[in-house]
């Protein structure tokens, strides 16, 4: 699927109702904490990240995107036992980048969504590892194979998830 | 200036948000031991997520219990029969091990050891994870309102899984849950000991979620398959709980071995756990009460040199004296003990023997002189041809229970004495018998 360049006039900006804007990230965080308890392979998926990318692409507002990313990342951090801010920083940048990209590109089709998610998952992991290693001094091991597999799994899931979440979009 | 800011408004906001978060991280890293700066946001997040997890787990268990307890009962009778058979086997094993346990307690008492007891636990349900591969922790449905405190040990029937890190629910508006740091997290540490070699080390998690044993010198011998137990040195986990099994040993950095351990508990599939809320340290309680010297215990277990006969020319050839342990009907005297040879004398030491209620082993008091109260208890081995009296009152005051012709002495080593039927009455020792010094318990 080709990624088509569009002008600002052609780009459609969507908004979401307040319940959806609050409930969808919370449900994503809840599922992220709950499903790996029963299905361990699900720990490779980052549902909150997918939600951040989806909202950022749909809203196409960098400020809203980075704020959404920061909020979701900080809540995700709060559930861990590590200092708060690692996921926050990574998802802030991803939210900003995805919304900025959404302004430039048509990301409504499945192919572009797959590629965009693949790219931003990688960016997210690089940021997370950098912050955790350099700022917190955590010993993390980077595995290209694991990261690639996770990125592909997240990208596939993103295509399906975005199709479901499209139903909640409202035209401005 | 204003024009530049408005032009780069988005980037400015991004930098500002990132700066605030980096600043927050720096503050948290600096105050690593103080959780207060981030307490509030954690409470909010936990309050939002955990009630949903709790309710789903509760519903799921309700449905599962309904199905398993009321509908799906196929094979229950067979399982019941198997379990009964297992109980019988365990009872036999329990009887076998009881004696050694008593022995160990007596030795601990002698050495001034204090036993650690898990005196109270609380069962809890695992309701969720952290959602991060780099933070290996779980959430339990019990918190401050149930008496959970940080640094309490969390275990399953298989072994140790972690310790309580954070507790929520101090006030009634918070969800009462707790966060448990698993032993495979890279920030965790457990004081452990190898069961066979008694080498101590520190168990740590790795970034990949594996568990390794650190601080074991490379010149030590560690074999794959060795069991790893808690050492109790970290003051969190009680001593002796199973932690894991050594799976791989290789030379590590510097002077230490690189030992990989497989946890006994399945950390990836946790459902119900026990939180150890109270531990007690107390001196071991020995059945029968009074303390006993280690030498006396060994003297009772091992054959010893017979006492020297008295230098009395008027007396007939001196018999050997003292307490003789008879082989139990089963043929052995205690597990792991050396079977005394026939006629082996186990007196001669300053044994302070007290009675014990449980009597898995027997010895026979051959004080058949008819004088009760004599503590020159010659306890011949069953089957020994002649029971010879002690030449002089044994220095160890043996606490006996005088019962007519035969003195039935029950020692704290669980030695039961009874008269030998096939032996002639021994000669009365030359020295005057000493009355029993204590009554058996």
Image (tube, rainbow, N blue to C red):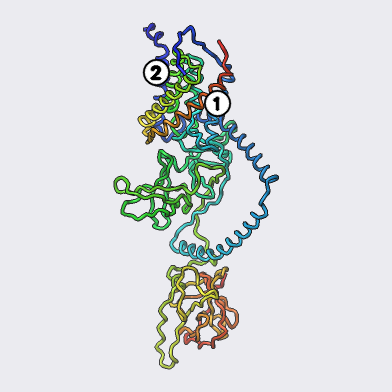
Q: Please determine whether, in this image, residue B333 is positioned above or below residue B111.
A: below
Element on which disc 1 rests: helix
Q: CA distance from mark 2 to mark 1?
A: 26 Å
Residue A77, position in %: x, y?
Answer: 47, 29
Can residue B409 be seen here? The reply is no
Instruction: Please identify the residue farthest to the left as the structure is shown.
Output: B254
Q: Which mark is residue B121?
A: none
Chain label for disc 1: A
* Residue A42 located left or right of residue B64: left
Residue B67, position in %: x, y?
Answer: 67, 42
Residue A25, quarter of picture: top right
Give a yes or no on whether discs 2 and 1 share a subunit: no
Q: Which residue is mark 1?
A: A26
Element on which disc 2 rests: helix
Q: Which residue is mark 2?
A: B15
Q: Please determine whether, in this image, residue B303 is positioned above or below residue B280.
A: below
Residue at image x 40%, y 41%? B206
Residue B34, position in %: x, y?
Answer: 44, 34
Query: Quarter of the image containing the C terminus of chain B?
Result: bottom right
Instruction: Please identify the residue farthest to the bottom as the structure is shown.
Output: B314
Residue at image x 54%, y 83%? B367
């Amino acid at each position: 699927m080709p990624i088509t360049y569009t002008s600002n006039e052609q780009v459609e900006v969507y908004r979401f109702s307040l319940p959806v804007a609050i409930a969808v990230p919370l449900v994503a965080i809840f599922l992220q904490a709950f499903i790996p308890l029963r299905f361990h392979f699900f720990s490779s998926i980052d549902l909150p990240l997918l939600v951040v990318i989806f909202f950022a692409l749909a809203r196409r507002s960098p400020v809203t995107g980075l704020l959404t990313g920061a909020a979701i990342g900080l809540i995700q951090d709060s559930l861990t036992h590590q200092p708060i801010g690692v996921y926050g920083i990574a998802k802030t940048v991803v939210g900003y980048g995805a919304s900025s990209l959404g302004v430039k590109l048509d990301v409504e089709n499945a192919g572009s969504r797959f590629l965009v998610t693949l790219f931003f998952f990688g960016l997210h992991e690089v940021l997370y590892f950098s912050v955790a290693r350099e700022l917190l001094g955590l010993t993390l091991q980077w595995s290209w194979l694991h990261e690639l597999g996770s990125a592909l799994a997240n990208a596939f899931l993103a295509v399906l998830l975005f199709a479901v979440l499209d139903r909640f979009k409202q035209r401005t | 200036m204003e024009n530049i800011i408005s032009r780069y408004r988005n980037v400015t906001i991004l930098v500002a948000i990132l700066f605030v978060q980096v600043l927050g991280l720096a503050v948290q890293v600096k105050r690593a031991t103080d959780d207060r700066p981030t307490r509030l946001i954690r409470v909010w997040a936990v309050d939002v997520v955990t009630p949903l997890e709790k309710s789903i787990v509760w519903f799921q268990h309700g449905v599962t219990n309904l199905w398993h307890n009321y509908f799906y009962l196929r094979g229950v009778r067979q399982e019941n029969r198997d379990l009964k058979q297992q109980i019988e086997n365990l009872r036999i094993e329990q009887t076998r091990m009881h004696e050694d346990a008593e022995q160990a307690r007596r030795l601990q008492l002698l050495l001034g050891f204090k036993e650690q007891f898990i005196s109270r636990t609380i069962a809890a349900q695992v309701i969720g994870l952290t959602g991060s591969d780099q933070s290996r922790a779980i959430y339990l449905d019990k918190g401050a309102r149930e008496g959970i405190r940080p640094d309490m040990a969390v275990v399953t029937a298989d072994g140790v899984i972690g310790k309580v890190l954070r507790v929520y629910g101090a006030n009634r508006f918070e969800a009462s849950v707790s966060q448990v740091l698993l032993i495979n997290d890279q920030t965790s540490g457990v004081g452990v000991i190898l069961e066979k070699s008694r080498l101590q080390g520190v168990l740590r998690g790795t970034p990949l979620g594996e568990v390794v044993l650190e601080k074991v010198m490379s010149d030590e011998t560690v074999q794959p398959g060795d069991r790893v137990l808690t050492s109790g040195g970290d003051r969190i986990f009680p001593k002796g709980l199973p932690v894991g099994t050594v799976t791989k040993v290789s030379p590590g950095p510097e002077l230490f071995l690189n030992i990989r351990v497989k946890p006994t508990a399945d950390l990836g599939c946790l459902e119900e756990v026990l939180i150890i809320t109270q531990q007690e340290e107390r001196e071991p309680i020995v059945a029968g009460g009074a303390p006993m010297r280690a030498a006396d215990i060994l003297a009772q277990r091992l054959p010893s040199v017979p006492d020297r006969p008295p230098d009395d020319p008027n007396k007939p050839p001196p018999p050997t004296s003292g307490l003789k342990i008879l082989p139990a009907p089963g043929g052995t005297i205690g597990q792991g003990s050396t079977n005394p040879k026939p006629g082996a004398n186990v007196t001669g030491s300053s044994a302070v023997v007290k009675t014990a209620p449980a009597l898995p082993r027997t010895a026979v008091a051959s004080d058949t002189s008819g004088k009760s109260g004599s503590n020159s208890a010659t306890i011949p081995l069953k089957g020994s041809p002649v029971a010879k009296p002690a030449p002089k009152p044994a220095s160890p005051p043996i606490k006996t229970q005088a019962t007519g012709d035969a003195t039935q002495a029950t020692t704290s080593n669980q030695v039961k004495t009874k008269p030998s039927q096939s032996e002639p009455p021994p000669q009365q020792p030359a020295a005057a018998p000493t009355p029993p010094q204590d009554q058996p318990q």
